[in-house]
Image: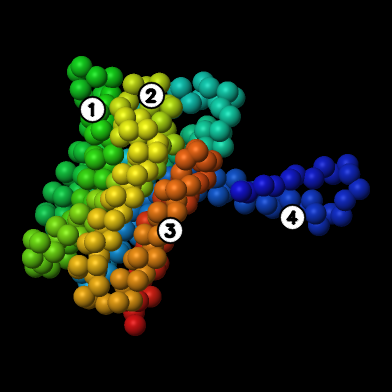
Amino acid sequence: MWVFTLKSPFLNLPEGNLSLSFGSYKLKKVFDLFVFGNFWVALCAVAQGLLTYLFIDRDPSLAIIAILFLSTFFIYNIRIVLSYHKIVKNKNAYTSNRMKCVSSHVNTIRLLTYLSAILIIPFAIFINNKSILALSIAAMLAFVYSLPVLKNRHGGLRQIPGAKTVIISLIWASSTVLVPILDSNIHLPIFNISVLFIKRFLLVFCLAIIFDIRDIETDRYSHLKTIANQLGPIKAKRLCYLLLIIHIGLITMYDLPVGINIFLSLLAFLSIVAYLIYKSYPVKSDYFYLFWVDGMFVLQYLLVLPLTLI
């Protein structure tokens, strides 16, 4: 993916080839920053929030959408900010595309991370107290997930065996399901909210396990006991398939009666997720995980959106 060649000006090649190659090089640099700088995952959170608004048939709140983007961008980049001096020190030692990009733009990422935290404040003025409470709970989970809040462990709650994937899933489900619903002041049965929350939780859980499979060696080195390195990659993938089957059962019971088109689109979407689970091991490139796997959040929204406009 993204193979490119920067032609030498000393070779007897047409000038157009050189311009095209240089243009491809610049495009790849922009794309890398977009993905590895966590702009893409922030858009993924926005897509899931918009999907919730579609499901509850309410117009999205600009303030909520902005906060989802800014808070996700901040949370995913705060570890880069906290590791700033280490990243700068080891800038020339990194070999992965991701860390090469991060180290090259670490000052920009740090500045934008601080800016994102500041920009959340004015948008928060326009949302109700219930939404602020739900966002605060999700933010608290995000901080204790990664920051060293446990005295007997060298890290946050993610150091508890198996907790990493569960906490990530709770954060995403809380922020992209509960926050839009609370913001809309819509009176839905608790059961309906619970079903939507569980479906979102299961989806995030499956995709998070794919990342655990990617990180299985580094997590072992860090003594982080994730589901993937406890079960092994093959059994972890089987767990994902089981959760997808449960998810299919839920959309069959609760989405099929609403509309066959949305049900079929969700079924096609889960088939793609199953394929990515299948391809997740042996480990692939950073692009596979950070663009394609994360991109499932955007794809789900794009598949459902046209059907709600009919």
> Could you say whether the residue bearing mark 1 is in a helix, strand or loop?
loop
Which amino acid is tagged 4?
Leu
Residue at image x 50%, y 38%? 282
Residue at image x 45%, y 23%? 85
Is 102 placed above or below 2 here?
A: above
Q: Earlier in the sequence, mark 2 or mark 4?
A: 4
Q: How far, Cα to Cα, is label 1 from label 4? A: 50 Å
Residue at image x 48%, y 26%? 87
Q: Nearer the viewer, residue 287 or 37?
A: 287
The residue that mark 4 highlights is 20
Q: Earlier in the sequence, mark 1 or mark 2?
A: 1
Q: Earlier in the sequence, mark 3 or mark 4?
A: 4
By what rule are the colours in the image chosen?
rainbow
Q: Is residue 290 left or right of residue 175?
A: right
Which amino acid is tagged 3?
Ile
Q: Which mark is residue 272?
A: 3
Residue at the limit of the structure toward the bottom, as seen here: 310
Q: How far, Cα to Cα, is label 3 from label 1? A: 31 Å
Q: Which mark is residue 160?
A: 1
Q: Nearer the viewer, residue 49 or 223?
A: 223
The residue that mark 2 highlights is 220
Q: Earlier in the sequence, mark 3 or mark 1?
A: 1
Residue at image x 30%, y 27%? 225
Q: Is residue 302 left or right of residue 19?
A: left
Is 185 placed above or below 155 here?
A: below
Graded by Cα atoms within 10 Å as few (under 14), some (14 to 19) or many (20 or more), the crowding at tag 1 reads: some
Which marked residue is nearer to the observer: mark 2 or mark 4?
2
Q: Is residue 184 left or right of residue 123?
A: left
Graded by Cα atoms within 10 Å as few (under 14), some (14 to 19) or many (20 or more), the crowding at tag 3 reads: some
Q: How far, Cα to Cα, is label 2 from label 4? A: 43 Å
Is 52 placed above or below 282 here?
A: below
